[in-house]
Image: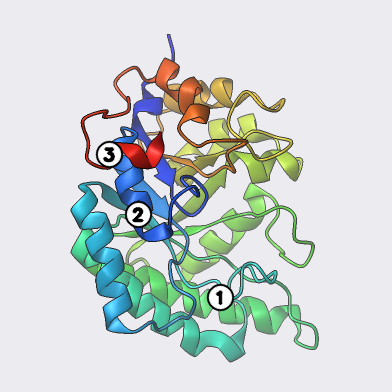
Amino acid sequence: MASALWARSQANISLLFAEVPFERRAAAAATAGFEAIECWWPFTVASPPPAEVDAFVASVADAGVALRGLNFFAGDMPGGDRGVVSNPSRRSEFDDSMAVAVDIGARLGVTAFNALYGNRVPGLSTDEQDEAALDALTAATEQCDAIGATVLVEPVSGVGAYPLKLAGDALAVITKVRERTQVGRIALLADLYHLTVNGDDVRRVVTDHVDRIGHVQIADAPGRHEPGTGAADIIGLVDLLEQSGYTGGLGLEYVPSGDTVAGLAWLYQLAPGLQVNADSPAAEMVR
C-alpha cells in the first residue's frame, strides 16, 4: 500500500502549472485536487509594492488552498543567485523580504519559510559570509516564531558556488543557529532530488535525522521531472519517511515533462483522494 504521505502533497506553483499565468496557478492547483501549495519568492524584488503583495494573497485565498511553504527573497534566481542570507551587503534585502514574508504568513497561515543560504561571494572570506548567514538565520528564526512558522535550510545542487551540498552541511548550520537562540524553529529542508544528485546517502539522512527534517520536496533524478521519469527511488524514500515518523508535508518541486495535470497520473494512483475537480470554474485551466 502506498504511503499516506502522498495525500499531503503540496504543488509548488513556481514550477507546476506553468501553462497558466502565475496569478492563476493557485486556482489551477485547487482544480487539480490540491489542498495546499508552496512557492518560491513570488516577486521580482525583496520589498514589493503592497498592491502586489495583496494581489498574491488574494490569488491564494480566492483559490481556497493553503499556502504552506514560501521562500524568502533569493536574489536573481534565473541569473544564478541562490539566496542572499550569507551576503552581508544584502542583509537589508533579506530583512525586507522577511517582513513581507511574515506578513503574508500571518494572513495565509504559512508554516515554513525557506531561507536559501546564498552562493559564495568572491572577495569575502567564508568566515565573514558564514557569520552573516548565522546572524540572518537567527533573526529569521526568532521573527518567524511570532506566527509559529519554521525556517528551513536547504542543500542545493547544480550551482558550484552554493556551499550547502549535503544534509550534514545544512544540519551543521542549524546546530550553530540553535547555539545562538532557543527561540523559534529551524529545520532541514530535505529535497530528495538535490540530495540524490549531490551524492548524499538519502536513506541514512531520513533514518538518522527525521526529527530534524521540517519539510520534504521531491523530483526524480536525473532530469528533475515527475516520479517515474528517472531512476531515483522516490516512492521507497517516501515510504521510509512515513515509517520513520515524518509528519510534515511533501512538496512537488519538479519540472513537469509535459502538461502538468496529465503528468499527475502517477500521483492520482498513489493518492486516490486527489482528483481533478471537473465542475470547477477553473477546470479549463488544467485541461
- Residue ID at (61%, 68%): 77
User: Of callouts 2 and 1, which one flags the residue occurring earlier in the amino acid sequence?
Assistant: 2
User: Of callouts 3 and 1, which one flags the residue occurring earlier in the amino acid sequence?
Assistant: 3
* Mark whose residue sits in front, 3 or 1: 3
Tell me the distance, in whole angstroms, between the alpha carbons under discs 2 and 1: 30 Å
Tell me the distance, in whole angstroms, between the alpha carbons under discs 3 and 2: 15 Å
Percent x, y for residue 100?
A: 33, 77
Q: Which residue is mark 3?
A: 35
Q: Which residue is mark 2?
A: 24
Q: Is residue 109 visible?
A: no
Q: Nearer the viewer, residue 283 or 227?
A: 283
Q: Are marks 2 and 1 in contact (CB under 8 Å)?
A: no
Q: Are marks 3 and 2 in contact (CB under 8 Å)?
A: no
Quadrant for the N terminus, please. Answer: top left
Question: 151 above or below 81?
Answer: above
Q: How many marks?
A: 3
Task: In the rendered structure, find residue 85 and report the number of the disc placed on it.
Answer: 1
Tell me the distance, in whole angstroms, between the alpha carbons under discs 3 and 1: 30 Å
